[in-house]
Amino acid sequence: MRNLFVIPVLLITFNHSVAQQNPTRVDSLQRILDSVDRTNYAEQIKIIQQLYNLYLANDLPSALSVAKRQYRLAEEGGEISKKGEAAGWIGYIYYSQGKNDSSLIFLNDALESFKDRPDKKKEAELLNNIANIFRVTAKYDTAMVIYTNLLKYYESENNLIMQGKILGNLGSLYYTAGNQEKAREYTLKSLALQRKTNDKRGTAVSLVNLSVFALNKSDFNEGILYGDEALNLLKDIDKNYYAAALVRVGYCYYMTGKKEKALEYNLTAINIYKENHNIRGMMEAYRQQGDYLIEMGRYTDARNTGKEALQLADTSNRLDMRLLYDMLKRSAIWLNLPEEAIHYSQEQIRMKEADLNEEWAQKIADVDAKYNTEKKELEITALKSEKKTNTILIVSLLAILATVAGTGYSIYKNLKQRQLISAQRIKELEQEKQITATQSVMEGEATERARLSRDLHDGLGGMLSVAKLKIATMKGNLTIPEENVASLNSAIELIDTSIKELRRVAHNLMPESLMKYGLNTALADFCHSTDKVTYHFFGSDRRPDEKTEIATYRIVNELVNNALRYSEAKSINVQLIVDDTRVHVIVEDDGKGFDLEAAEAKGGNGLKNIRSRVTSLAGRLEIITAPGKGTEVDVEFNC
């Protein structure tokens, strides 16, 4: 089972408060509502608001019904604000049910209701909900802009609860963009604020997402630990979130061998989603069930499950559709249905090309860099203002120095020192600003490499495999003239060669071994693929953080390729040392060496890229070389 991609969706936090349903209270309010004069809009709306809050946790269809009733009543009574409130409710429920287009219409309608009566707090809540829809419909750059602007707003309001929600949603966005390290960073920040503010729902959502991070690195026991805590919190808070958690935690149990418990969790989730007409949730649960069935060899059942899910799917949820097509493609391949496999593979590729264009990953990195850079610029402006003020004070003090020589000299020294400190701090912040920008570029590059690698491997690779299967099937079923057999065998060999070449290109873009097994395994694979290169590893099996692993791998890749290309070396030695606090890599060759100063002056891209990667992670770089004496490069990161 492909554990890295089975459950790619994290939970996100919508702005909504939920009360616990009390059947007696609901029946009482319903009787009161039925007895109220139909022309008394205000009284009806007052009761509907209470009913909506009671229904929301466990009965979405009833919540939708009363929300629509308030919408109609408010429209008839000219209550613009109440109509906007109801539109926001309807938008939330449609989103929960996977009806993204309808949800966006009503959320925008709700936002429009504040046009004449601005309310920043409510508008911000609606914008968060709208950003969530943009995230699941693959409009990542738009979602990122909204989230970062909201984070600034809530920071200015010192609203810790909402800061926690937005940080969590940013984590989900980064996860969708393929940057798990950044996603986990934001999720942990979110969890800290949610625990601090006793936000139980938010805490549970973050715990579920941490469970997903754990299962993606195959630490299923940690996933169960986070997941069970989340389930205990969610069981009596919100059935829909509870169902989503069941699917994710169930996967962790499945991977630890407790398959029956996983199937039980999944079935419970499907039933909850059906009761609440939650299409998105049903899609996810059905897809998970299909993956279980494929892994157990029950391919016909998996195909039937996928087709049933396809009938329920909301086609505007592009991410769900791509994953569903992938599951149907795999089941068709196993069942030897090449036409069907090609169809689903083509649909999957078509959606990937439409959604994951080459710009969005960089746009996300750019917006995040802009947000962090703006914060640095604010600090720089403040320090520059302080520096200017200090200069004025120094001049004034000099005018009266004769009368207050002793005291004035002391103050002058103090201010001068502060001025020097301010100037130094400005310089540091400017450097940090540059590092932030460099890191964002590196993250964007890594994300795009990973995306292209997945697209080549899963998309084109799948199609070539199906083509080979189809030709092999034809060969077995048809009578082929003897003179054409060699041509057919040649075609099959050509496809095999194409598959191998495609895998080589995908591996070079972003080695699967680096993501799955870590830096040591990836470097060993890379070095052992070339006769001239030897590889040695020393230290612990600890995996550094993702940024350091990717940067180190790219640096070694660049150094080895440069040595092979230019140094005329007979041998190249790569050493990796990992201990509790650092990663140290050494690349040395016995080639012709070079003039380092001349190379630096020339400004070649190779050395420039290596320096940028090292600087972005505050590492240390040392290059020892001279013409005719070979080259040694030492790179060290603290992590």
Image (cartoon, grey):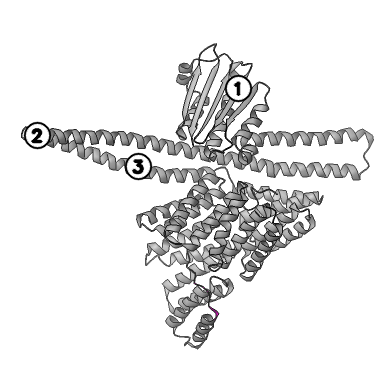
Instruction: Give the amino acid at mark 1.
Output: Asn
Q: Which residue is mark 3?
A: 377
Viewer-nearest of discs 1 and 3: 1
Question: Which residue in the rendered view is the most extreme toward the top?
Answer: 628
Write down the region rendered in magenta.
18-23
Q: Which residue is mark 2?
A: 399
Relative to residue 314, is residue 422 depicted above or below? above
Q: Earlier in the sequence, mark 3 or mark 2?
A: 3
Side (left or right) of 253 relative to 499: left
Q: Secondary structure at mark 3?
A: helix
At horizontal 58% and vertical 57% (from top left) the residue drawn is: 227
Instruction: Give the amino acid at mark 3.
Output: Glu
Which quadrant would residue 137 be assigned to in this image?
Answer: bottom right
Task: Please tell me whether residue 21 belongs to the stretch shown in magenta.
Answer: yes
Q: Position of residue 51 (x, y in %)?
A: 50, 77
Q: Which residue is mark 1?
A: 573
Task: Please tell me whether residue 25 belongs to the stretch shown in magenta.
Answer: no
